[in-house]
Image (spheres, rainbow, N blue to C red):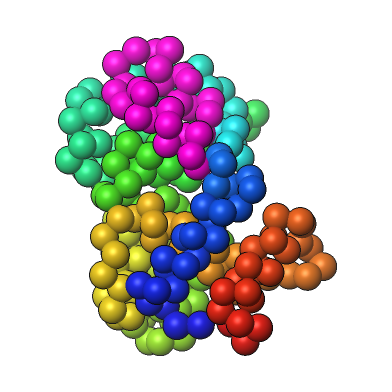
């Protein structure tokens, strides 16, 4: 399967047709349209809780994290401008710690929170997609050197996505569409028949319907 505008679009369509993932995405999008700003603790808490639940993203203290997000100065302005620094401001500095005293890094949650407010500027970080991107970059020789593959640095993660999109001539600008497409592609790429659930099998079947059994 070649990475292209067509394959990204078709895989996004598979994501949106999924009986669980598509419904969850529609619900979150509706919530963000109703509550676009981050000026009240109730609003931030509601968005944090919904993202945590529907995206199955670990957040161990939604109230503390919501208060932390609310405390970020000019957050709505920074999100509207697509400033990448907002991700780091959300993921750390909240003071939520493990039993060992180490502060949790809510990296994936932070990218989801930012993306949902401005999907044209913030791609979502996902471990599986991250591995998929690294595989493409290394197998094609587009990037050499481990420092450039440290995708826990958000700027490098975004640049890596942009690099492979440019390399394969993908002109889609909306990271939300790209996120969905790459997630479905990576899910199929790493499919494991022994460790898959019914949601995974649904995706495998749809991929093969759309692209053929040699996808």
Q: Quadrant of residue 145?
A: bottom left
**Image position of 26 with respect to 8: above or below:** above
Is 165 or 142 nearer to us in this picture?
165
**Does 65 appear in magenta?**
no
The residue stretch that appears in magenta:
25-51
The answer to whether residue 101 of the structure is visible from this angle is no
Q: Is residue 37 magenta?
A: yes
- Label the magenta part by its dominant secondary structure: helix
Q: Spot the residue most to the right.
A: 194
Q: Nearer the viewer, residue 206 or 150?
A: 206
Image coordinates of residue 155 in percent, x first then y, are 29, 56
Q: Nearer the viewer, residue 142 or 81?
A: 81
Coordinates of residue 68 in the picture (x, y in percent):
39, 22
Query: Residue, x 42% and y 31% (percent of image)?
Result: 30
Q: Name which quarter of the figure residue 102 lies in.
A: top right
Q: Residue 66 location in percent, x, y?
A: 44, 21
Q: Nearer the viewer, residue 127 or 49?
A: 49
Residue 210 visible in the shown view: yes
Quarter of the image that includes the C terminus: bottom right
Q: Residue at x 31, y 26 (%)?
A: 36
Q: Residue at x 50, y 34 (%)?
A: 27
Q: How many numbered circles does the render carry? A: 0
189 w.r.t. 68: above or below: below
- Image x and y of residue 41, in percent: 39, 13
Which residue does the image show at 61% across and 82% down from the upper left?
212
Question: Where 91 sits versus 197, above or below?
Answer: above
């Amino acid at each position: 399967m070649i990475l292209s505008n067509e394959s990204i679009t078709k895989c996004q369509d598979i994501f949106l047709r999924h009986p669980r993932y598509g419904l969850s995405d529609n619900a979150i999008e509706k919530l963000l349209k109703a509550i676009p700003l981050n000026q009240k603790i109730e609003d931030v808490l509601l968005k944090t809780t919904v993202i945590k639940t529907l995206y199955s993203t670990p957040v161990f203290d939604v109230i503390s994290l919501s208060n932390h997000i609310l405390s970020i100065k000019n957050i709505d302005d920074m999100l509207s401008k697509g400033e990448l620094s907002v991700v780091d401001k959300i993921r750390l500095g909240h003071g939520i710690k493990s039993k060992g005293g180490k502060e949790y890094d809510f990296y994936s949650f932070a990218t989801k929170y930012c993306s949902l407010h401005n999907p044209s500027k913030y791609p979502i970080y996902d471990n599986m997609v991250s591995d998929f991107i690294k595989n493409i970059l290394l197998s094609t020789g587009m990037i050499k050197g481990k420092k450039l593959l440290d995708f826990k640095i958000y700027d490098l993660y975004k640049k890596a996505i942009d690099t492979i999109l440019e390399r394969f001539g993908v002109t889609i600008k909306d990271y939300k569409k790209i996120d969905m497409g790459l997630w479905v592609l990576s899910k199929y790429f790493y499919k494991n028949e022994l460790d898959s659930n019914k949601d995974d099998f649904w995706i495998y079947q749809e991929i093969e319907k759309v692209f053929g059994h040699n996808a």
